[in-house]
Image (cartoon, coloured by chain):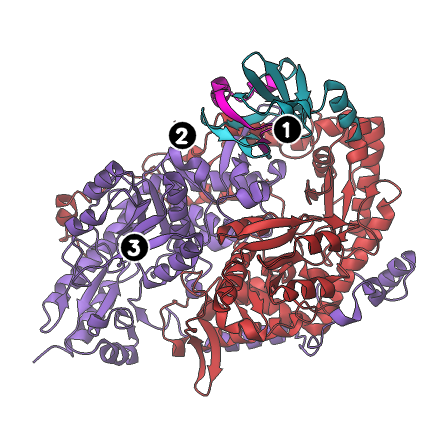
Chain colours: A cyan, B red, C purple
Amino acid sequence: MIKYTNDHEWVKEESDGYTIGISEYAIDELGEIVFVELPEENAEIKKEDEFGTIESVKTVSSLYMPIDGTITSINQKLIDEPSLLNDNAKDFEWLIKIKTDSKEQFNTLMSEKEYQDFLETL
Amino acid sequence: MTTQTTENLKKPETNDETVSQTNELSKEKNLIYDYSLQGKSACRLPSDFLPQINFNSLEKNGLLRTEKPRLPEVSEIEIVRHYTKLSKLNYGIDDGFYPLGSCTMKYNPKINEDVASIDGFKNAHPHQDESDCQGTLALLYDLEKSLCKIFGFSAFSLQPSAGAQGEYVGLLIMKAYHKNNKNLNKNVILIPDSAHGTNPASVTGVGWKAVNVKTIDGQMDLDDLKSKLNDDVAGLMITNPNTLGVYDKNIATITKLIHDVDGLVYWDGANANAIMGYASPAVSGFDICHLNLHKTFSTPHGGGGPGAGPVGVVESLIKYLPAPRVIRDKNGYRYDKGTKDSVGRVHGFFGNIGILVRAYTYIRSLGSEGLKEVSENTVLLANYMKKKLEPHYDIVTPSPCKHEFIISLKREKKEYGIRALDVAKRLMDYGFHPPTIYFPLIVPEALMIETPESEPVAEIDKFIEAMIKIKEEIISEPNLLHEAPIKAPYRRFDEARAVKQPKLTYFWT
Amino acid sequence: MYYSPITESQKSDLLAFLGKEKASDLFEDIPKSNRPTSFDGLPSLSEIDIMKSSKSFASKNKNSDDYVSFLGGGIGDHYIPSIIKHIAGRSEFYSSYTPYQPEISQGNLRVIFEFQTMISELMGLDIANASLYDGASALAEACVVAINAKKKFKVLVPDRIPPNYKEVLKTYLEPKGVTIDYFNSELFYHFNVSDFKKKISEEYAAAVLPYPDFFGNVINFSEITEYAASKNVASIFLCNPTSLALLTSPGELGADIAVAEGINLGIANFYGGPGLGLIAAKKEYLRLLPGRIVGETVDKEGKTGYVLTFQTREQHIRREKSLSNICTNQGLMALCATLFLSYMGPNGLRKAAEQCYKKSEYLKNECSKLKGFEVLNRTPTYNEFLLSLPTDAEHILSRLKKKNILAGLSMAPYYKSAKNVILISVTEMKSQIELNLLIDALKEFEEK
């Protein structure tokens, strides 16, 4: 199952945790992405705290944790080739994988339908 | 400049004179290094009359440079031609209207340059005795007094090199004040969400935290402000009129609310051009301010500096100002070394004196009446243009605006896929410098238009005409805007490539 | 009003269009309680009167044309080629804004790209930015770069940087919670390299290495930089750019970052400002550098051009997370320096630097022959040196001033033990006659 935040992140439920990325809408808004900064593995980060930044030529966007979690893996390819995010925007190119004890936080996020409705209001 | 019609702005024609010329330029030599030829030199120095002295002692210590720095080897005429050519690829105020919001790109009077080139000012060494600098010191003293009169503050430090450095000094003054009052827990500066980026960056610079206050109907949201007031608040920084072009009517209430929690209020004077003679920040309750002399007082922007950012304070804060400051006593003018409370020095010497001389010349040219008229005319032009454009664009600034107003292209983006950037680039095709874009951050797809008083009405009308034509193009030929500029010396640049494959020097490897 | 292109009748028309009677109606939104009380009374002068009055102000100053001057201490009496005022005086340069719109700002952008190249070449480092306010703030910004790179909050600084620079460092760094440890030498003019080395430890983010220092000493810091690197301490060189045509570059000596006051690169003294802050660094510091940076790219048609780049470091984008609040550079001064360095070229700049050095050596030599005078520097120097006089410095300086010679800068205000010491600065501008004039004048004070 995939859910969304109003910071335009998607969170995908996996068998051993969650995978997190940013939505196609956000990638379109940013334009060509030139720099991605991701956290150290094993870092514990609370919901709504910053876990990284993503830069296009003229914007810096902070990435916020959608739920509490411990970083189990980061998408190393993006550090060397940030524009993969643009290239694979439709294919859910991921940023980080986490494990969490706060499953209930996941349930409160927006569904695909709710997120599409939210985009309409922007 | 002649008026350009939409017709001849449609397509880049390869046989067009301007385009083909610039094509050649870029194929030719871009940089002074491209003219370099070993053994060529422009420089003629007197001959060496000390041939007997060698460099052995440097060499022995490994201090004699063996590889020359790779500087260009060129003749004088090549330098003159190259840079004359480069100047023509630039756009300055003498070329046309510069509607950059919050930048106040007004005419730079020529006499300012002439006064600044008088040898007595220009060739003075900063370590000369004060008795040998009485002219400059007198001028600085009088400039400070004039600024006090115009804005109502009790004293100014003329040392800060730019507005951002002025902000930094202003915050240090707050810090020193709270330290003296043993208010050591204060560490929050409130900033409206419409503020310039330098404000929050300066707050971080002094080790404090910036907290945003919301804007509602173009003014500070008083309820949001009240909800953020507590004993941690060290002060508030605000631009008034703000970056939406609105004079915040509640400013006296706001300054009082901040004073009630023993905070200080900082006036970012970036938009001072709009209120001279009509509002005094000191009278409105502000404690500290900076001015941008390169905006309000006509000193040249220089392609990005040098500026000057004097900091003014009310009586009770004078002791915190950076030292030294010029004072006058029975023996003439001299530098006061400051008290133990001074926040210290921010310039290696006394500030950007060359800029201060120009600003002083401007103030003396205009006098009080002239400065008041400056504000009247910039506001008049802004309201005129705003009203003319209202039928065509969504303008978020309510009336009356001050010296600038904001257009939002949110609707055009949604309906036609046209963004603020596209309109900005298209304006170049009509011969104008674009306005400020994507600022303030709270307005989506913002175009921020300022109308300095030095613009003729005819120029303003031409800009209005261009904006209306562009609106027609947005609807009928949006592709023209995506392609723009087509008449400028260059087309749009690949800015992502500059980051992804950086080349930051000629010899970059 | 001066400079107003709007006639009274145009004004009335515009006001009528807005439904207003008079200009002041446009200010009704400003409450009465905000109105100024002190505003009126500044006179307006004609252009003729301003020029007369400005000349009268200026005539109360003396300057380098009135004296044979050996004043230095960061700013010297250097050559300014004629082309500079003619090119930098073109209003397409001086009246333009920051080049945010590259399609119509290639003039400024190319100048900055050339400038970055020339400064990084002089410093022997990979990158340079578009300039900072002045040398003093550049040194402070360099310390901030090192602090952010190393995530440590202490810097080690020898006492012998210019005194004003110490004050600026304090103003910039202390509010950020940074500790500045000064290294004092036992004898104020002597610098013990191995003692300094002992002070370097892993707790520091950076060591500042003045090259030359305030007293003119030029020291080979390669041993220090190597040791500092082993302790994860960045080496920041503070240099004089004109000297770098002659002296081994900071990069070659192991600098991580180098800064300088660039006013000596073709810019008028103007009583100390506007100056030109230079900063260069190794590539690895790129994302931490303050200020503007220009890079090469292509436009839509493939034409090579230049743009402001890595802008996400800067305050207008990163706001409170930006590592510096700097907005402007010193664009016009960077243009002057670029013109100067193009004009001088590698050979001219070297020749000028050699002349500075030789003339200084000549003076050192001649002064040493005078009874009661002593050159205090024990290391090589570039164009400045310390001279100990037989009597009180202020006394001798004021006597020489009566002969229209500014013999140097008294060290007495800065160092208690230096009552008799002056700093003499010699540049390529000085003729043999002028050098001998100083020596002859000093002879009067020889001990009998």
> Where C308 sits versus C34, above or below?
above
Q: Nearer the viewer, residue C296 or B200?
A: B200
Magenta part of the chain? A62-88
Circle 1 SS class: helix
For discs 1 and 2, the disc positioned in front in the rendered view: 1
Disc sitting over residue A30 in the figure? 1
The quarter of the image holding the C terminus of chain B is top left
In the picture of the structure, the residue carrying the numbered disc 3 is C181
Circle 3 SS class: strand
The chain to which mark 3 is attached is C
The crowd level at tag 2 (other Cα within 10 Å; few <14, some 14-19, many 20+) is few
Seen at 24% across and 66% down, the residue is C423
Disc sitting over residue B508 in the figure? 2
Task: Classify residue C69 as left or right of residue B328.
Answer: left
> Where B198 sits versus B333, above or below?
above
Q: Where is residue A117 shown, x and y percent of the image? A: 79, 24
> Where C71 sits versus C45, above or below?
above
Q: Are marks 3 and 1 on the same chain?
A: no
Circle 2 SS class: loop
The crowd level at tag 3 (other Cα within 10 Å; few <14, some 14-19, many 20+) is some
Q: Are marks 2 and 3 on the same chain?
A: no
Q: Nearer the viewer, residue B400 or C62?
A: B400
Q: Disc 3 versus disc 1: distance between alpha carbons?
A: 44 Å
